[in-house]
Image: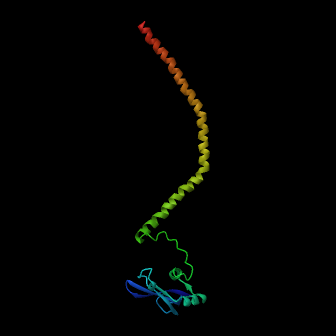
Amino acid sequence: MLRIRLSMGGVRKRPVYKIVVADGRYPRDGKFIEKLGSYNPLLPKDKKERVKVEFERVKYWMSKGAQPTLRVSRILGEMQLMPMPKPGNNPLKAIPKKDRKKEGKEEPKAEAKKEEPKAEAKKEDPKAEAKKEEPKAEAKKEEPKAEAKNEEPKAEAKKEEPKAEAKKEEPKA
């Protein structure tokens, strides 16, 4: 399968890429069919020398079935030669790799723990609701009894108080 991709050149710490058409089985910097342009990522984005592309040749090779890689399709999208590809969803992109591993191990456990209580709560909800309703009914039944019990000691206390007062009065008399 033909691919339109970047072939790396330049020296260490100063990369320069060629935009080439190559068979997908060939190595990245290996044999290619045709050079279509160049890309220098070190130059500012507003400079014209950053990306040089032969548009007619790119259109020709795409008509022949060559597929651009993701990076090349972004470059061509910026040049408005083809539509921009959809942005990828990588929420960990801004996190350093050292921290990704730590968070990656902790997050699945935390998520699993969060999901378990929810699942348990869902399982227990019908039973718990029935249990909650039963104590309410029992509490209503017990409340009148408790009120009656509360009133009886008060009445007994009132009866005892006059006896105590009577005893106190008797010695005085």
140 or 51, which is in the foreground? 51
Residue at far top of view: 173
Q: Quadrant of residue 152?
A: top right
Asked which quadrant contains residue 115, the reply is bottom right
Task: Give the x, y percent position of residue 19.
Answer: 49, 87
Q: Nearer the viewer, residue 63 or 127?
A: 63
Residue 164 placed where, x, y %? 46, 15
Q: What colour scheme does the image use?
A: rainbow
Q: Work out whether 104 lies above or below 49.
A: above
Q: How many marks?
A: 0
Quadrant in which the N terminus is drawn: bottom right
**Picture layout, residue 100 above or below residue 171:** below
Which residue: 37% across, 83% down? Answer: 13
Image height check: is 66 above or below 97?
below
Residue at x 61% of width, y 48% of height: 127
Q: Residue furthest left?
A: 12
Q: Position of residue 84 (x, y in %)?
A: 55, 78
Residue at the (41%, 85%) spot, across then down:
15
Could you tell me which residue is drawn at 58 percent across and 30 percent down? 145
Location of residue 103 with respect to 76 vertically, above or below: above
Q: Quadrant of the C terminus?
A: top left
**Residue 99 location, x and y as percent?**
41, 68
* Left or right of 15, for residue 136: right
